[in-house]
């Protein structure tokens, strides 16, 4: 066996059907689309069209609602907080707020506020100023001698220009 003897099994690869290449090809003239009508035209495929009857996706009831002014919090876990403290990016002697966390690179934007989550453990005493915190996270911070101060949510401006609390 040589390199020039290597080939696919017979019938393993099949060349694509070339349509619109003349009557002799068997796929010329109408290019196997039949005659006339929207389906014979290029670029027209009406998904969900049921011949003028109300389509199924429009007949079924819609569920759910997305609050337009809901709060989007930047979430910080105890593990990420401890890593930033260990790396020296955060100063434990100063109160740690959203601005300090952004400067330390814990997250890029504080969004509508910071929410503290109790994933992992903390072993450094630190004073936190956050928008929200889970009960377990507060307990974990207070166990090492730190404090958690919860401040009001940040105000966001709606599209109409009026302020809305998030």
Image (tube, grey):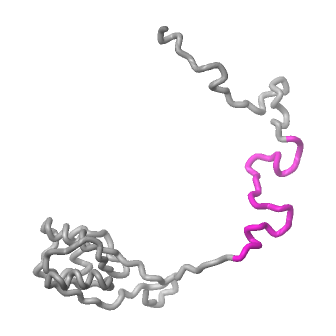
Left or right: 137 as drawn, with respect to 95: right
Nearer-the-camera pick, 122 or 106: 122
Q: Quadrant of residue 84?
A: bottom left
Q: Which residues are magenta?
A: 34-61
Return the residue nearer the eye: 134 or 157.
134
Left or right? Give the position of 53 relative to 142. right
User: Relative to residue 156, is residue 147 drawn left or right?
Assistant: left
Which of 1/154 is in front? 1
Looking at this rendering, what residue extends furthest in the left direction? Answer: 93
Magenta span: predominant SS is loop
Residue at the spot 77% in from the left edge and 73% down from the top edge = 59
Q: Tell whether position 144 is magenta.
A: no
Where is 115 relative to 153, above or below? above
Quadrant containing the C terminus in the rendered view = bottom left
Residue 83 falls in image quadrant: bottom left
Determine the residue positioned at 83% across, 41% down: 33
């Amino acid at each position: 066996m040589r390199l020039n003897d290597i080939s696919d099994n017979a019938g393993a690869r099949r060349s694509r059907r070339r349509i619109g290449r003349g009557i002799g090809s068997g796929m010329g003239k109408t290019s196997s689309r039949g005659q006339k009508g929207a389906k014979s035209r290029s670029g027209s495929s009406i998904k969900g069209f049921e011949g003028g009857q109300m389509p199924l996706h429009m007949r079924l009831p819609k569920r759910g609602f997305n609050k337009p002014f809901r709060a989007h919090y930047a979430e910080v876990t105890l593990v990420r907080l401890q890593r930033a403290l260990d790396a020296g990016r955060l100063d434990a002697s100063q109160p740690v707020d959203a601005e300090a966390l952004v400067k330390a690179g814990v997250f890029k934007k504080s969004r509508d506020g910071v929410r503290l989550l109790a994933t992992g453990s903390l072993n450094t005493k630190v004073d936190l100023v956050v928008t929200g915190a889970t009960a377990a996270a507060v307990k974990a911070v207070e166990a090492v001698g730190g404090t958690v101060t919860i401040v009001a949510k940040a105000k966001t401006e709606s599209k109409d220009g009026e302020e809305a609390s998030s």
